[in-house]
Amino acid sequence: MKILVTGTAGFIGFFVATRLLEDNHEVVGIDCVNDYYDPRLKYARLREAGINPDLIDYDKYVLSAKYPKYRFIKLDLEDESALMRLFEKENFDKVCHLAARVGVRYSISNPKLYVNSNIVGFANLLEGCRCHGVKHLIYASSSSVYGANEKTPYSEDDRVDNPVSLYAVTKRTNELMADVYAKLHGISATGLRFFTVYGPWGRPDMAPFLFAKAILTGKPIKVFNNGNLSRDFTYINDIVEGLTRIINHHPKSPGNQIYNIGFSHPVSLMEFIEVLEEIIGEKAKKEFLPMQPGDVYQTYADISKLNRDFGYKPSTSLKEGVTQFIQWYLSSKNLLR
């Protein structure tokens, strides 16, 4: 299949594109390579996939030196005309949409960036799929859509009308937009609500990276809500396994299906810190702080629907996943350590 993967300079997109290429699919990857976090890490991911950053120019193909079936284009999803030209030229079989403005707290202070990227950009992508006969759109939603829900584990049937951040609003809006396009235009779409993805090449704005860096440099880590938080930490390999199963699936009829994709075993923040301390071999200095605006107390995925339909069974323990992350963090591949 020929697959468009958006966000291939990002964490999940990098791993998904690599897996699809190893499975002998043809991949066109796009990313605007914004500066939400240090672009050096984004360009390092691209280099790892055989894309020479020195050759990257806007709206121009760069061929991978590592994967013959991989081409990368620096492109902004808000650039409707360039995106439509790409769809018209390539005739994609499927689209895996993983690009987005991420980060709950940053969305509160920069709302317009999130509306333009996550909503306008997604609308352009839907139009590309509609106008050019894409057979299946797979797109990233988020566990943040559950907002302040107190019932756990979170089920796809739960109410999602109580968001606590603009980021969550944009992700729920994506789900509703896909619903409408499925009903009006016969598109087949699958939305995945990700739960706290971590692992090698992970985002530097997330807890594993922030905490590891602080511990290794002797600086205090910021522990919000005095440590009374829990997260459904899910290792990147498990996420990629679930995603590729869905990408290789061919829906029999139009519609928009929503799935949770997580580990389904929440871990307290203090337990996570203890695992990091054990693997690094140093104690963390902790700065206890109140709850942050836009944050939630816990995330906990009910993954029974994804297990039923695709046989999804995450298997990477927290200790194993954090060990893999720390090995990468300390390696020469991590330019931000």
Image (cartoon, rainbow, N blue to C red):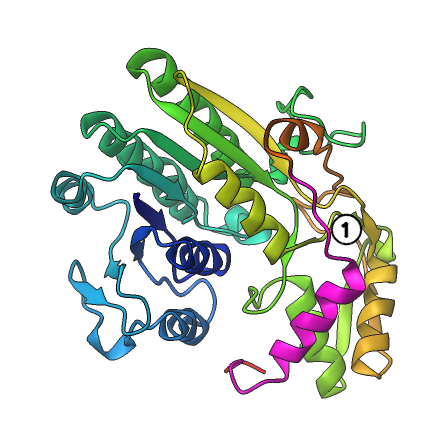
| Mark 1: secondary structure | loop
Assign the N terminus to one quadrant of the image: top left
Left or right: 23 in relation to 207: left
The residue lying at 19 percent from left, 27 percent from top is 131
Q: Which corner quadrant of the image does residue 162 belong to?
A: top right
Is the residue marked by circle 1 packed among few (<14), some (14-19), or many (20+) residues within 10 Å? some
Is 325 magenta? The answer is: yes
Magenta segment, which residues? Answer: 312-334
- Identify residue type, mark 1: Met
* Residue 59 in view, yes or no: yes
Residue position marked by numbered label 1 in the rendering: 291
Is 106 magenta? The answer is: no
Left or right: 300 in relation to 268: left
Q: 76 and 300: which one is in front?
A: 300
Q: 217 and 60: which one is in front?
A: 60
Q: 73 and 175: which one is in front?
A: 73
Q: Which residue reaches farthest top?
A: 184
Residue 25, horizontal then vertical, whole percent? 34, 51
Residue 63, horizontal then vertical, whole percent? 22, 67
Residue 179, horizontal then vertical, whole percent? 43, 19
Q: Is residue 247 above or below residue 236?
A: above
Q: Is residue 3 above or below residue 136?
A: below
Q: Which residue reaches farthest front?
A: 24
Assign the C terminus to one quadrant of the image: bottom right
Q: Is residue 49 above or below residue 304?
A: below
The residue lying at 19 percent from left, 30 percent from top is 132
Residue 87, horizontal then vertical, whole percent? 18, 40
* Residue 164 in view, yes or no: no
The residue lying at 32 percent from left, 66 percent from top is 67
Left or right: 145 in relation to 140: right
Q: Which corner quadrant of the image does residue 40 belong to?
A: bottom left
Q: Which corner quadrant of the image does residue 280 belong to?
A: bottom right
